[in-house]
Amino acid sequence: MNETIDLREVAARWLESLEWAGLTDLPARSIRQLGALELPPRKAESVAESPAALQPAAIQVESVQTPIDKTEMAHQEQTSELSHESPPASSAEARRVPNPRNSARVPLQRALTAEYGPSRERGEREKLLNELALTVAGCTRCPELASCRTQTVFGVGTATPRLVFFGEAPGAEEDRLGEPFVGRAGELLDRILAACNLKREEIYIFNTVKCRPPGNRNPNDDELANCREYFETQLEILQPEFICCLGSVAARTLLNTREAVGRLRGSIHNYRNSRVVVTYHPAYLLRNPAAKASTWQDMQMLLGAMGIAVSEGGAG
């Protein structure tokens, strides 16, 4: 008599079998087929369990609607020895390539995590952010910054943001309190958010570097390079739809350009799977109040792209 089993368990055991067999990569199309499944936690290995016992062919299923493409499985067997030679592709690249023989290959351990960041539950994202924050707190890559900081300033906000604000570096108040944008510039940012009908708890705010540079100077190229891994990992975990770069340091670092804010604003740019709007830093607006009108234009463009109703006024 055929036994009805959970298709998710079939997929989980199939992944384990491939890993035991030495296959560490899968065609991106197969990953997408499995991406819709919520796989159960992987069971601990035991002496009694063997790869042969977990092969999908040994599992009797009464009715399964092609969970795995047989053509792709045959191709995997033919090319498993070459799997490490092809670098992982982004999920966007994978979506553009329907042919499994031409599909980019992604590591199994990333199949249902990094490649499907938007599907992560809030708790998982918070856990990953907390782990990264602990790593950042002990960082000494920049000896000067590490020696004079009060504490690192990691970032604040929801772990599932549609929009993130990306600044340049902590100031004195941020260094003291451990939170970005809490000084005068932070007060102005709060007024900008209020004018946009946004709240801090609905977005995420962080900086290019996590330590305050002495004298509130701009972070130098080495410091930006040392912290790049941290803010890029934050963005990989958060997977925002929109990024608002506040100031030239944030915009140039994220977009890898030397263009000034005046030339970058007014257009929507791209960073991986996120859309990017560039505007002036609130600290710059405090020194140059006339630029507030331009910043409000940028916010209107951002809100329009997000499909959010734009209020008539602006931030004072």
Image: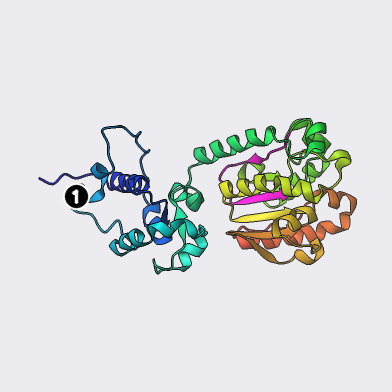
One can see residue 194 in this view: no
At label 1, which amino acid type do we have?
Val
Please report the residue visible at 81 percent of the width from the left and 64 percent of the height from the top: 262
Q: Which residues are magenta?
A: 152-166
One can see residue 243 in this view: yes
Measuring from the top left, give residue 291's x and y in whole percent: 84, 58
What secondary structure prevails in the magenta region?
Answer: loop
* Above or below 180: residue 235: below
Please report the residue visible at 79 percent of the width from the left and 62 percent of the height from the top: 258
Please report the residue visible at 57 percent of the width from the left and 59 percent of the height from the top: 273
Residue 125 location, quadrant? top right
Query: Viewer-proximal residue, 303 or 12?
Result: 12
Query: Viewer-proximal residue, 94 or 22?
Result: 22
- How many residues crowd mark 1 within 10 Å: few (<14), some (14–19), many (20+)? some
Check if residue 161 falls in the magenta segment.
yes
- Quick one: SS at disc 1? loop
* Above or below 127: residue 91: below
Measuring from the top left, give residue 7's x and y in whole percent: 28, 48
| On-image quarter of the N terminus | top left
* Above or below 305: residue 41: above
Q: Mark 1 sits on what residue?
A: 61
